[in-house]
């Protein structure tokens, strides 16, 4: 049988334990639990995320390399004469090249095709195939350089004209091609026709520049 003093001490200790448990008799958080509750929320490991590539806008203007720059035409400082020129001259050949690319830019492929020798045959393509060859382009432009010197062979004259072709594909990627267009005309000899005595394109040799 417990004495009154021992019973009182026991009851007092019991109430002290309940008070220490806090409301509803729940034990307080341990020091470790308290630190964890005050810690910032856990975050995922910092794994680098590669952003998705942004597609080029096929309608965005593209500025090609300027003359004298890598990928550009030669930087010819010679002023271009504004005097009238003969269609049979080298400048007449350059004018044909200028007309050719203007027709392509205007999607007038039949007219451009006919500027190839042999009524389009020198292009190596039918008119339909020639036109389809431009389907992949959203923009197609050209810069024309000063023509070279005329050369003659076997009753014909030849001239090379520097060209820079640039623009964007339909997927938005830009392109810049550099090279030459070669033109031929039959000299004014007996038996030649008026059409043969005009400049016609025989070859366009261009390459993609970096």
Image: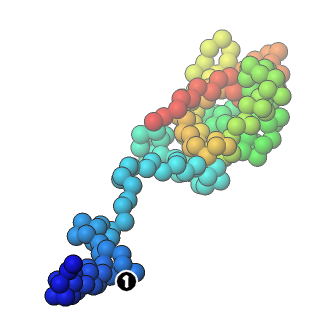
Q: Nearer the viewer, residue 93 or 64?
A: 64
Display colour scheme = rainbow
Q: Quadrant of residue 154?
A: top right
Q: Residue furthest front?
A: 1
Residue appearing at x 64%, y 49% in the figure: 58
Looking at the picture, does residue 150 appear above or below residue 8?
A: above
Q: Nearer the viewer, residue 81 or 47?
A: 47
Where's the C terminus, which quadrant?
top left
Residue appearing at x 37%, y 83% in the figure: 23
Residue 156 on image: x %, y %: 67, 18
Residue 97 is left or right of residue 1, and the answer is right
Residue appearing at x 38%, y 49% in the figure: 47
Residue under numbered circle 1? 23
Q: Secondary structure at mark 1?
A: helix
Residue 206 on image: x %, y %: 56, 29
Residue appearing at x 58%, y 33% in the figure: 161
Residue 28 on image: x %, y %: 29, 75
Q: Quadrant of residue 26?
A: bottom left
Q: Nearer the viewer, residue 39 or 124?
A: 39
Residue 51 is left or right of residue 119, and the answer is left
Residue 200 is left or right of residue 80, and the answer is right
């Amino acid at each position: 049988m417990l004495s009154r003093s021992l019973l009182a001490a026991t009851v007092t200790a019991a109430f002290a334990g309940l008070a220490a448990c806090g409301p509803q008799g729940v034990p307080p958080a341990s020091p470790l639990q308290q630190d964890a509750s005050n810690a910032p929320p856990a975050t995922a490991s910092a794994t680098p995320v590669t952003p998705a590539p942004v597609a080029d806008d096929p309608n965005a203007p593209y500025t090609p390399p300027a003359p004298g720059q890598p990928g550009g035409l030669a930087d010819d400082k010679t002023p271009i004469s504004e005097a009238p020129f003969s269609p049979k001259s080298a400048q007449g050949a350059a004018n044909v090249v200028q007309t050719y690319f203007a027709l392509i830019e205007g999607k007038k492929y039949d007219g451009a095709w006919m500027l190839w020798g042999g009524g389009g045959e020198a292009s190596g393509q039918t008119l339909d195939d020639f036109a389809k060859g431009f389907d992949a382009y959203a923009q197609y432009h050209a810069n024309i350089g000063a023509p070279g010197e005329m050369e003659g062979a076997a009753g014909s004259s030849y001239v090379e004209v520097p060209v820079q072709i640039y623009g964007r594909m339909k997927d938005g990627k830009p392109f810049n091609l550099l090279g030459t267009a070669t033109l031929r005309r039959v000299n004014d000899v007996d038996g030649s026709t008026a059409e043969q005595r005009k400049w016609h394109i025989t070859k366009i040799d261009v390459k993609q520049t970096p």
